[in-house]
């Protein structure tokens, strides 16, 4: 039993064997064969999908992936669209730290000194000393 | 009710005709009345594998043109009662026949036979379309190689489009040693990729060539070979019986098997 386990481990580790390669190639191949989509059509779909989704969120175009996967004789088109950041609407601007509107609005906040609230002094952290300003 | 089965593959040379000949013979040995139709017009081979090439007088073409009756064209196997062959013409090509012609031939055969097995030519053109026209079921034959599996997949798609829903897979010419060495796809790999139910696994066997040379299907031989047992098992499964899968692992003597033996042998 130990021998069989060792043999299985050995087989699994060997990356130069052709069986995993042929399975990978076939799965990819058949996913494409089955849908009868040529590369031009996939590229056109990619552009259209990007355009539609970009109306709602901003997409990281470089890492956009569109693949075909097949299992049980059903092929699925899978689109992986990493979202860079949300497209903002007016009411949400204060909540977004990246928003330019927020940084603009920061400039308008003043601190009113007379309304500053001070804590009572802590005898250990803040020992009493002679303070002329008091 | 007669069962009309087509053996097809897409790819050529994967064993359709060998399977048709041996399966037909095996079913006849089980007591069934079987007619094999060679649909490879222009490149006929089924007659050779059955060793009936010298007994062909008329072919399907003469039946269709009215030059002879259907019974006159059928070649009855003298070794196995219940089995006969409707030969293909060698002179004309696949374009001379239309699907309606095949439908008519099969319609005239069904009253007298339990099984009508149609040996489909390679490819997906006219010959293929003619062969699948009368079929209700299909046996897809493939080898565990990339081109064969790709073509088989295409054929499955075409069969489904032609409304043939009962499709089963036979993986032929398997080499268990290569599978263990991870240099050949396993039956599970092929079945997972094609996603159709498996009905047979036939190992690569030199005896197939010997039997073809002699014109004697393997299943007739007195000495059983792994391939002949596999063919008989497929026939049983087609008849609806449950048959365990053959153990195709070959004993070998690599370092690891010796280590295994060491660990598994009794010490006391």
Image (cartoon, coloured by chain):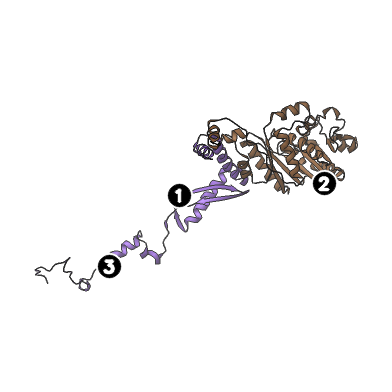
In this orientation, which residue lies closer to the viewer: B129 or A46?
Answer: B129
In this orientation, which residue lies closer to the viewer: A42 or A63?
Answer: A63
Image side of residue B201 versus residue B3, left or right: left
Displayed quadrant of residue A37:
top right
Q: Which chain is brown?
A: B
Q: Are marks 2 and 3 on the same chain?
A: no
Residue B66: in sight, yes or no? no
Dot 1 or dot 3: first in sequence order is 1
Labels 2 & 3 near each other (Cβ < 8 A)? no
Residue picked out by circle 2: B2
Q: Which chain is purple?
A: A
Q: Position of residue B107 (x, y in %)?
A: 85, 45
In this orientation, which residue lies closer to the viewer: A70 or B196?
Answer: B196
Q: Residues within 10 Å of mark 2 (few under 14, many from 20)?
A: some
Image side of residue B78 versus residue B164, left or right: right
Classify B261 as above or below A130. Answer: above
Residue picked out by circle 3: A109
Disc 2 or disc 1, which is closer to the eye?
2
How many numbered marks appear?
3
The span from disc 2 to disc 3 (Cα, nearest Å) is 90 Å
Q: Residues within 10 Å of mark 1 (few under 14, many from 20)?
A: few
Q: Position of residue B124 (x, y in %)?
A: 71, 39
């Amino acid at each position: 039993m130990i021998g069989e386990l060792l043999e299985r481990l050995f087989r699994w580790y060997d990356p130069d064997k052709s069986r995993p390669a042929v399975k990978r190639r076939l799965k990819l191949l058949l996913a494409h064969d089955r849908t009868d989509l040529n590369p031009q059509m996939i590229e056109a779909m990619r552009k259209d999908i990007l355009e539609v989704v970009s109306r709602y969120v901003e997409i990281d175009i470089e890492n956009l992936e569109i693949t075909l996967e097949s299992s049980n004789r059903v092929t699925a088109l899978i689109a992986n669209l990493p979202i860079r950041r949300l497209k903002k609407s007016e009411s949400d601007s204060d909540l977004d730290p990246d928003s330019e509107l927020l940084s603009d609005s920061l400039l308008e906040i003043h601190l009113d000194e007379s309304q500053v609230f001070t804590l009572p002094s802590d005898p250990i952290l803040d020992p009493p000393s002679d303070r002329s300003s008091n | 009710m007669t069962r009309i089965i087509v053996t097809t593959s897409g790819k050529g040379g994967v064993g359709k005709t060998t399977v048709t000949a041996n399966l037909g013979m095996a079913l006849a040995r089980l007591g069934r009345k079987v007619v094999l139709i060679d649909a490879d017009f222009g490149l006929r081979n089924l007659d050779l594998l059955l060793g009936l090439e010298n007994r062909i007088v008329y072919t399907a073409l003469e039946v269709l043109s009215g030059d002879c009756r259907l019974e006159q064209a059928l070649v009855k196997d003298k070794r196995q009662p219940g089995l006969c062959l409707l030969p293909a013409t060698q002179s004309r090509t696949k374009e001379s026949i239309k699907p309606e012609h095949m439908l008519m031939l099969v319609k005239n055969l069904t009253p007298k036979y339990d099984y009508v097995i149609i040996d489909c030519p390679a490819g997906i053109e006219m010959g293929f379309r003619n062969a699948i026209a009368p079929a209700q079921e299909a046996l897809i034959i493939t080898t565990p190689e990339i081109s064969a599996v790709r073509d088989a997949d295409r054929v499955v798609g075409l069969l489904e489009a032609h409304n043939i829903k009962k499709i089963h897979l036979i993986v032929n010419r398997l080499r268990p040693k290569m599978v263990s060495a991870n240099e050949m796809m396993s039956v599970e790999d092929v079945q997972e990729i094609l996603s159709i139910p498996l009905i047979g696994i036939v190992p690569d066997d030199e005896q197939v060539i010997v039997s073809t040379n002699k014109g004697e299907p393997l299943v007739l031989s007195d000495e059983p070979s792994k391939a002949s047992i596999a063919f008989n098992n497929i026939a049983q499964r087609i008849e609806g019986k449950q048959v365990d899968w053959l153990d195709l692992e070959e004993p070998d003597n690599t370092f690891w098997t010796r280590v295994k033996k060491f660990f598994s042998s009794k010490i006391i």
